[in-house]
Every structure is written in structure tokens, then in C-alpha cells.
Image (tube, rainbow, N blue to C red):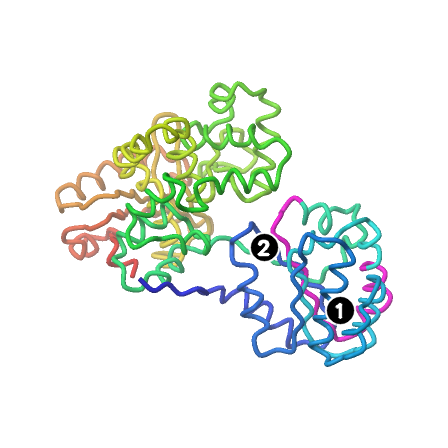
Amino acid sequence: MQITKFINRKEELNSLGKLWQGDKAEFVVIYGRRRIGKTELIKQFIKNKPSIYYFARLESEKDQLDSISATFSDFFSDAVIKKSSLTTWDAVFEYLYQKNERFVFVIDEFPNLIHSEKNLSVIQEYWDEKLKHTKIFMIFCGSSLSMMEKYVFDYKTPIYGRRTYDLLVGSLKFKDVCEFFPNTDVEEIVKIYGVLGGTPAYLLEFSSDLDRTILNIIQKRSFLHREPEFVLREEVSEPRYFMSILHAISVGKTTINEIVNLTGLERGLVGKYISILRDLDLAERDVSVTESWKTRKSIYRIKDNFFNFWFRFIYSNMQEIEQNPEFAVDDVKRNFNSYVGFVFEKIAKEFLMEKKPFKFQKIGRWWDKDKEIDIVALNEEIKEILFVECKWKDMDEETSVKILEKLKEKAKFVEWNNDNRKEYFGIIAKRIENKEKLRKEGFRAFDLEDFK
């Protein structure tokens, strides 16, 4: 199967393109988890533009200066610095200042460049005093979110507040992932997305079919076998605690109390570590859609599908995998359908946000005590509300009608503009028999055929 290497990112490219069309200096910061596609995005942006791309390796300062000097020499056809490299970072930025041309200057893996606080002070001084008055378009890019926070976003860093634009590169959405597999059935893509998520490098690990891909991960034939562990080791100082928390969430322990009980960690530590996981874009807080964000009635989810899959099926079975990989394979086979059901809810929510079956301002899950509804969308201005159930199964007409009737009963418990609201009801499933008939009766009915 042929897989396209660069997919979508239209919004990101448009934003960068608008900045490029200007005539003033730009200091752009691009960041996101490793393997998320930052470098490919940058290369796509600088295509057909005068640009200097420098990848900062983790090496001595002298080697870095020699390398960047050679890069400058090639771009500016400068034989002098090819023979005699620039020897300080002051010289590097002075050289760029003297050019005073419109070109893109990229430093990829920027944190590797920081040998001391002095380097940051040099950048700050040259930006403040010289470079911001030129036409340069600087891009600093980094994968370690904790390091980017330390060197770029922390108010104590010398270059804090100097950036003119920052761009967090996140995972691809489901509709974008579909572009990776243009000749694949949508149902299969849902499963692939449930396992590999929306990280381009992870999607490139897909190997002919999903069962083989999962087996490769379990049997250590893919870098994904320990990938979440390596990501956490790069970002935090105590990865074992974070891994325990993510594992707890992956097996359904989604409240603070449940996580505390399973991990044995103190409540204050769990709250602190979850806050860090949210900053790292690995976990997210969820509240019932009719509640204020100030509510304490919140739950936590793993944001990335692959991390969720890995902690649920790989980390949970790591000891057994060492002795008998088939144990993990059997666990996946037994529980995969229910796991994908949760993923399908997220895809359905994304679909409704794109489709907009009615104008809504807020969308999410609703729950109260023993009752819950998969998706509720509401419009405060015109008092309209949509209730949707998601089912990862084929639905005959009779079953669909029964589910919709039960949904109407549950909707009565949703305390939101009860006296004067207009209600809509819907169902989203793999396949829905006679969905056009349901639509004529006023229901919102969608299945995978509508996702294409």
C-alpha cells in the first residue's frame, strides 16, 4: 500500500504563508511532540522560498558552528566562511543581520543549540537590537515540549516575549488520516486510527494489515514497542509515575480518586502529574457538557489514540509479552471492539463539528450519576440541543428506533433550558438500515458512508 508522506496541514501552512507575505521580521516558534510532522511541515513551507535549514544536532558548540557556517556558505555562495568558520553565535547572528534580505532561517531541534544561558542572551540581544529591524523570517523548532517551555515560553528565559508567532503542531484529525489510506475501507481506517492515532510517523508503521501491525508492535519489530516510554523519558524526570497514571486512565480509572486508588500515589501528586501530562498534550480533562469548567466533577482521558492503545494493551501486558507475546494478542482480540467504540465516539464528535447538522456552540459528553449520553451539542442563544448516541455496530431499523426512544428518555434528565428548548435526536453507527427513513422522521442519522 502506498502512503502519502505529507498530508493536509492546510491551516498551519496558510498561517505561515500569511506571515511570509509580510515585509517585516518574524520570529516564529514551532513546537510539538516528536514524530508529529513538524520538520515535514517546515520543509513544505520553505519549498520554493529562499531558505536556510539547519538541524541542530546534539554535539559540541564548535561542531555546531562549523556546520552552520557550511550551511551559510552554501546558501550565500560565500567561499570565505567555507574556509574559516564563524567562531561564536554573535558572529552567526551578525552575519545574518548584515545580509538584510527576505529569507527563511530555520533552526530545527533548537534546544540542542543551548549550551548555556549565554546563547539565549545572544539571540535576545540580536533580535532586540538588530534582527527585528530586518526582513528575516526566523523559525525555531523543537520537539521536547518541556525544553521548549524552559527555553522559549518561560518568562525567566531571555527570549521570552520575543516570538512574533507560535505554532503547536498536533495530531492529524481522522479525516486527514483517511488521506493516508485513500483505497482503504472507512471501517478499517477507524481501527487503524484507534491503534496508531494521528501521528504521521506512527501511521507510516502500518504494515499491510492491522493485525500484522499490532503484532509488530507487540513483538518488538517496530519502534512503537517502547515509544511512549521514550517520549516520557525525554519530557519528565520521573516517568514511572506518569506511566502509572496513564495506565490507570487507559483501563478506565478516569477520576482522581480512581487513579489514586489504583496507583497508590498521593492525591496532590496525581493532580500535579496530570497537569503536566495535559501541558504535554498527552492527557485531557473532560467535564459534562452542561457543567462549568470550574466543576470538580471531571474525568481524564488519554488524548493520543496510540498512547491509549499502548497503555491499555502493551504496557498492561509487558511482563507477559516477555514470556508469551500471544497473551497480548489474545487480549487485543477480546477487547478491541469495545476499545474502538470509545475511539469511534471521538471520531463522531469530530464529524459533527465538521458536518454541523445544526448550529451549536458547545459539544461533548453528558453524564450525571448513572446516566450518560455519548454526545450532546447545544446552542445557548437559540436554546437548541442535540442528543446523539454512538454505536460501533451495524444497526437494523428496529434497534435504531429503540435506541432513539431510550435516548429521548435520558434527555429528560439533562438540566438545560428545560422549559423552552428545542430538541433534536440522532444516532451514529457503523451502518444504519433505512437511515433515510429516520432522517425523514426528523432524526439525525449518520454512518460510515457519510464519513467519506
Q: Position of residue 424 (x, y in %)?
A: 30, 48
Residue at the disc numbered 2: 168
Q: Is residue 70 left or right of residue 343?
A: right
- The answer to whether the residues at label 2 and label 1 have Cβ atoms under 8 Å apart is no
Q: Position of residue 344 (x, y in %)?
A: 33, 46
Q: Nearer the viewer, residue 224 or 407?
A: 224
Q: Position of residue 208 (x, y in %)?
A: 29, 55
Picture residue at 85% right of the left edge, 60% below the top: 125
Residue at the disc numbered 1: 69
Q: Of the residues shown, which amino acid type is indicated by label 1?
A: Ser
Q: Nearer the viewer, residue 286 or 192?
A: 192
Q: Nearer the viewer, residue 391 or 440?
A: 391
Q: Is residue 323 left or right of residue 294?
A: left
Q: Quadrant of the N terminus?
A: bottom left
In 3D space, how far apart are the residues under numbered discs 2 and 1 (Cα atoms)? 29 Å
Identify whether 26 is placed above or below 77.
Answer: above
Q: Secondary structure at mark 2?
A: strand
Give the residues in magenta.
Answer: 123-146
Within-10-Å neighbours for mark 2: few <14, some 14–19, many 20+: some
For residue 237, which quarter of the picture? top right
For residue 216, which quarter of the picture? top left
Q: Secondary structure at mark 1?
A: helix
Mark 2 or mark 1, earlier in chain = 1
Whether the magenta-drawn stretch holds residue 125 is answered as yes
